[in-house]
Image: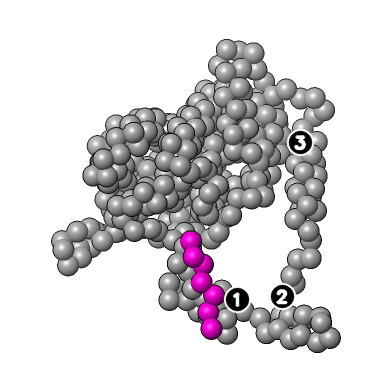
Amino acid sequence: MCIVCPWHDYDFRLDNGDSTSGLKQQTYAVKLVDDQLYINTSLDLSHTKSSEKQLDKKHEAEQQLRSCSEGEDTLCSWAVKILCTADPNEKVRLTHEIQERWQRGDLTEVGRCQPPDQPHRVESLNVVAPGKIKRGKAGTLGNRIALLHSLANIEQWAIDLSWDIIARFADTTLGDRSHLPKDFFTDFVKVAGDEAKHFTILENRLQALGSHFGALPVHNGLWQSATETKHNLLARLAVVHMVHEARGLDVHPKTLEWFSKQGDDDSVAVLDVIYADEITHVAAGMRWFTYVCRHAVPPLECISEFQKLVRKHFRGLLKPPINEEGRTIAGMSKEWYVPLMQPASRDADGEDSTTSVGGSS
């Protein structure tokens, strides 16, 4: 006997949790005694009601914001508020509001405020482990929606990553005892605003195709890299803002070609807007990585330090194809990444079997 999900074509055996998809779920022996159902498990299962979980998250957010000074109106206090905002559209709205205030000089103080371990998400969003997102059949409307939904998810995490680097590393003291200049925060406020814009145009495109963000499961792979690098500014810049962001440049040509073959010109236009901005984001990562290296005592050799940190904090090798043109425009020459690359393999049809359409995570 097996249980089948009609939407995703998942099937799981009830006796051992195996699936023809290769995924596996946990199964437990059950026994009915006097109208009481007993589950035989050694795991601690949660008996908390969903409404109680919501209250717990609200309490956590309130506690996080209280870590800032009462009534504080600083860049970091707003960064933490945005990280603690679960609703994606409200997160976007606040991001644009704070970006505008910072740019016109209405908000000037960076401040200090401890960010949460992980950004908040709405309870209805189905967050699953990376690798458990099932891909649809190529060429279908459903697959186009799934890919755009995946990109929208990446942009949501990218908004949070921008605010997190601002709040988490605001009080960083560099090797020469200097602090991060205001331009550092200005650059990542702009990145946050760009990512918010990207989410909005992707969400608009999803709605035009009859869907919306949250209609499909999402993963938190990008935030795993944030957690891995939360104690090291150079590692954060290297892995998140130079490896993951650059991966978005790498997959852009194939993704664009794929949507173009489907005749989806509106999605192509959306992807072109995102691509142009992402080049500037990689450039920002490069700029501040080299800045921090040069202010170390003694100064660090940038390329070797980058490669060392990627090998330590990033799982695996960088996968081809590599968008050399996009990376070069962003200031990342070959010597930065070629030693970290996985050689391209060829399948029976001569295609690059490591190529995937869909983004950096």
Q: Is residue 218 above or below residue 18?
A: above
Q: Is residue 140 above or below residue 245?
A: below
Residue 335: % across, % down: 28, 45
Dot 3 and dot 2 residues touching (CB under 8 Å): no
Asked whether the viewer can see residue 312, the reply is: no
Residue 319: % across, % down: 32, 55
Q: CA distance from mark 1 to mark 2?
A: 11 Å
Q: Which residue is mark 1?
A: 26
Residue 222: % across, % down: 51, 49
Disc 2 crowd rating (10 Å Cα; few below 14, some 14-19, many 20+) is few
Dot 1 and dot 2 residues touching (CB under 8 Å): yes
Asked whether the viewer can see residue 87, the reply is: yes
Q: Which residue is mark 3?
A: 65
As shown in the figure, which amino acid type bears the numbered disc 3?
Answer: Leu
- Residue 3 magenta-drawn? yes
Residue 43 badge: 2
As shown in the figure, which amino acid type bears the numbered disc 2?
Answer: Leu
Please tell me which of labels 1 and 3 falls first in the chain.
1
Give left or right: position of 67 versus 2.
Answer: right
Q: What's drawn in magenta, residue-wise?
A: 1-7
Disc 3 crowd rating (10 Å Cα; few below 14, some 14-19, many 20+) is many
As shown in the figure, which amino acid type bears the numbered disc 1?
Answer: Gln
- Viewer-nearest residue: 173 or 39: 39
Q: Residue at horizontal 47%, vertical 63%?
A: 8
